[in-house]
Image: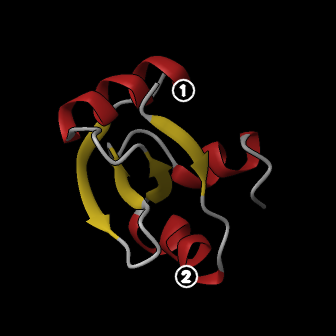
Amino acid sequence: MALQYPLATEKALSLVDRENIIIYVVDMGATKSLIKKEFEDMFKVKVKGVNTMRMPDNTKRAYVRLAPEFRASDLAKRLKLV
């Protein structure tokens, strides 16, 4: 399981509305394609793209952009982020 938990910081929540992006903390060894597949299977959405970033605190974040027909704000509500 590559996905660990969603990030609910102020910046992460601003990206939900502005960019249709959900930020997830993922395993350090997770690839973009694995993150995309797991995200689509788990939440039944279509992912447009995934960007990853290694953080100084030794975690890895995935910026998951949803396809235009899916709203990140709806998914954020399902995840109880807002």
Direction from residue 33 to residue 19 in the image, left or right = right
Number of marks in picture: 2
Front-most of 28 and 7?
28
Q: Position of residue 70 (x, y in %)?
A: 45, 40
Q: Among all residues in the image, which is located at the extreme front?
A: 58
Q: Residue at x 55, y 72 (%)?
A: 12
38 above or below 65? Answer: above
Where residue 9 sits, quadrant-wise, is bottom right
Q: Position of residue 73 (x, y in %)?
A: 61, 55
Q: Position of residue 50 (x, y in %)?
A: 25, 49
Q: Residue at x 61, y 71 (%)?
A: 13
Q: Do the numbered discs 1 and 2 sit on residues whose CB atoms are within 8 Å?
A: no
Mark 2 residue type: Lys
Direction from residue 76 to residue 56 in the image, left or right = left
Q: Residue at x 65, y 82 (%)?
A: 10
User: Which of the two discs, 1 and 2, labels the residue nearer the N terminus?
Assistant: 2
Mark 1 residue type: Phe
Question: From mark 1 to mark 2, how far is it between C-alphas?
Answer: 22 Å
For disc 1, the neighbor class at 10 Å (few under 14, some 14 to 19, many from 20) is few
Secondary structure of residue under mark 1: helix
> Any mark on residue 11, and which?
2
> Which residue is tagged 1?
43
64 above or below 43? Answer: below
Direction from residue 80 to residue 13 in the image, left or right = left
Secondary structure of residue under mark 2: helix
What's the image's color scheme? secondary structure
The C terminus: image quadrant: bottom right
62 above or below 5? Answer: below
Q: Residue at x 37, y 73 (%)?
A: 55
Q: Position of residue 31 (x, y in %)?
A: 21, 38
Where residue 67 sits, quadrant-wise, is top left
